[in-house]
Image (cartoon, helix red, strand yellow):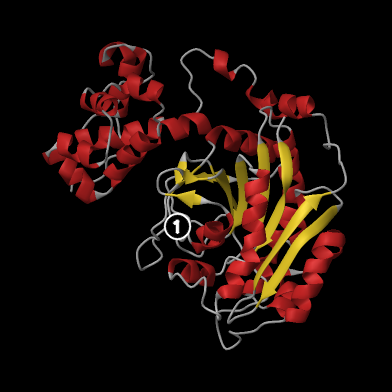
Amino acid sequence: MATIVGGVATSHTPTIAFAKDGGKQDDPVWKPIFEGYEPVQKWFREKKPDVLVYIYNDHMTSFFDHYSHFALGVGAKFEAADEGGGPRDIPAIMGDPKFAEHVAKVMVANEFDLSYFQGKGLDHGAFSPLSVMVDYNEQDGWACKLLPVVCGVLTVPLPSARRFYKFGKSLRQAILSYPEDIKVAIAGTGGLSHQVHGEGCGFNNPEWDMEFMERLEKDPESLLDLSIAELARRGGWEGAEVVMWLMMRGALSAEVECTHKTYFLPSMCPIATMIMEEVSNDAPVEAPAETLKRINWDYEGADKMEGTYPFTIERSVRGFRLNHFLHSLTDPVVRKQFREDEEACMSDAGLTDEEKRLVRERDWIGLIHYGVIFFMLEKLGAVTGIGNIDIYAAMKGLSVPDFQKTRNAAINYGVAGKED
């Protein structure tokens, strides 16, 4: 079974990345940033986690028109996002789709509604502190894999502090019931006290920051009944994102020891870190075998349903490139290019030879077997003038007239609207 090696709390201000990328390690003004993260780097080198569960919020970069309360990164890898001036010059970090799928199953079975994402860049909320905590280089990549948990803390309403803590408790259950022998670290990011908008921008409250860190270690449940407004009153509106530290704390054992703590306030936001080691040996809330049985109950027998292919996280990751390409046909520019030169359009999208063949031959059932969801077949049908009934018939291995005989009315239809 998986084990938890401990947790880290960290600020995620872009100041950290600015100092790192600007080579300011020896500048007296910036040096305290790097000194504060040196013990964290050392901790990661000693613990050698296989996966880092990373709790952060996107800053309206990759998540803008769709802003979830809780979104799980299930992709095979995650690039740095472009926040307006081009992406940082750092390698992509690998994900762990198999572990992500297990975590998703447990969280949903425990009645936490998630969204799932891949193909989205991670902004400074993720990569700013990551780049001074976890070792990486261009040749070998990063020293561990990442499971991003993106939290919606910028749009009101947002979940309560208690809800974040309960999410962490459920996350602990998910990790400890994972049947593979991996080591998992957990990071909670954001905060501490700061406000970056309005006339109240520049607000800080170091006294509250110290109190919060002390209570987070020794009595986290004393923080759970503080409202979002009260957290903002004490720590600034954006400082209320410390609920993500509570999620990390909820995923750790009841008793922990803080083996490292640092706090530096250079400008708008404190740059703080904490390392928490588990002290109490808390048993899982239920036996891992029972958890596995419970999370699979809803899907028992689905794999035996002939001609049926549930769109699992595993399938969505495997077929992501092709699904993404077919979805891009909703863009009139891509649609025009595809109609004029299919091969060039598919090459520009980076499709493999097998993926190109499936599209070229309109191998509808082959596309399904590959991991394409049916609703992307509709997109291809619309742009090529093929109706849904034609696709259904092909998947059944029937002619359209023979398939029509199995229906109550001989009609055909598709999702296409007006011609471009």
Picture residue at 60% right of the left edge, 81% below the top: 266
Residue 318, x across and y down, in percent: 43, 31
Residue 95, x across and y down, in percent: 51, 41
Is residue 418 or residue 55 the one in the foreground? 55
Residue at the far front in the pictured view? 26
Figure check: 29 above or below 68: below
Quadrant in the rendering for residue 339: top left
Residue at the far left in the pictured view? 340
Figure check: 284 above or below 129: above
Quadrant in the rendering for residue 37: bottom right
Quadrant in the rendering for residue 89: bottom left
Task: Inspect this view and state whether residue 60 appears.
Answer: yes
Q: Is mark 1 on a helix, strand or loop?
A: loop
- The reply, left or right, for residue 89 in relation to residue 352 is right
Figure check: 267 above or below 33: below
- The reply, left or right, for residue 266 in relation to residue 9 is left
Task: Inspect this view and state whether residue 224 appears.
Answer: no
Crowding near pointer 1: few (<14 within 10 Å), some, many (20+)? some
Q: Type of residue at label 1?
A: Ser
Is residue 187 or residue 70 the one in the foreground? 187
Residue 399, x across and y down, in percent: 26, 12
**Residue under pointer 1:** 62
Number of numbered discs on residues: 1
Picture residue at 52% right of the left edge, 60% below the top: 58
Picture residue at 35% right of the left edge, 19% below the top: 365
- The reply, left or right, for residue 393 in relation to residue 183 is left
Q: In which quarter of the image is the N terminus?
A: top right
Is residue 137 or residue 205 the one in the foreground? 137
